[in-house]
Image (tube, rainbow, N blue to C red):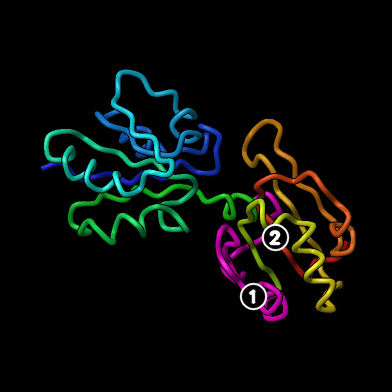
Amino acid sequence: MNKIKVVGLGPGHPDYVLPVAKRAINEADILIGGRRNIESINPKDKEIFIIEKNLKKLIPFIKEKYKTKKVAVIVSGDTGFYSLLRYLKRYIESEYLEVIPGISSLQYMFSKLGHTWDDAFIGSLHGRNLDFVKKVREYKKVGLLTDKNWPPKKIAKKLLDNGIKDRVMYVGERLSYEDERITKGNIEYFTTKEGFGMCVVVITDDKL
């Protein structure tokens, strides 16, 4: 019986997709993932299931297909870091899953900054409530995934409103791509900055 492969795509650029992940994608008969992820690997001659607002159909589709076809579920970044894996495990036993890791965008970001991240707090504001102010007070380094509801400007303003100004913020956009941009500044600097889309934010006790 085939295992359902859950495959991490890394931060975005194909150079950062692990060889084992590329092999799983190439061998799959069916690819499942968000539209942006599927389009990034330019699949040919494969059945495609685009994840949009149809999660209720996802599990029945997988259970119907995986016994006779090779199924790969494609996720951004690393499979073990705020990915679809948690949802899949609610309905599919682990023995039927093969998980292939990827490089998370936060892991990539810390490497670009030349920082270790084993001593950092890592979290996500993507559709979640997180007291990141408390974490910034407790840790010398904090890495955050953001979304449109929590752009860098709003994060910086909340930190400043809570009396935190002696930190450095780094904002990473389009990480791993040719037009990658990493912006550095103090907390106050980012309270006036607009225009960031989904990005990665790292807050440290570095010196400017």
**Relative to the observer, which residue lies in front, 8 or 208?**
8
- Image vertical order of residue 58 relative to residue 94, above or below: above
Q: Is residue 45 left or right of residue 11?
A: left
Point 64% across, 62% down: residue: 143
Residue 74 in the image: state x and y as whole percent. 39, 41
Point 39% across, 52% down: residue: 84
The quadrant where residue 179 appears: top right
Residue 203 in the image: state x and y as whole percent. 73, 64
Q: Earlier in the sequence, mark 1 or mark 2?
A: 1
- Image vertical order of residue 183 relative to residue 141, above or below: above
> Circle 2 is placed at which residue position?
202
Q: Real-space Cα distance between discs 1 and 2? A: 15 Å
Point 82% across, 69% down: residue: 167
**Is residue 87 found inside the magenta-colored segment of the image?**
no
The quadrant where residue 178 appears: top right
Is disc 2 placed on a helix, strand or loop?
strand
Residue 27 in the image: state x and y as whole percent. 26, 29
Is disc 1 placed on a helix, strand or loop?
loop
**Relative to the observer, which residue lies in front, 164 or 13?**
164
Chain part drawn in magenta: 112-139
Question: At label 2, which amino acid type do we have?
Answer: Val
**The C terminus - image quarter:** bottom right
> Circle 1 is placed at which residue position?
131
Residue 26 in the image: state x and y as whole percent. 32, 28
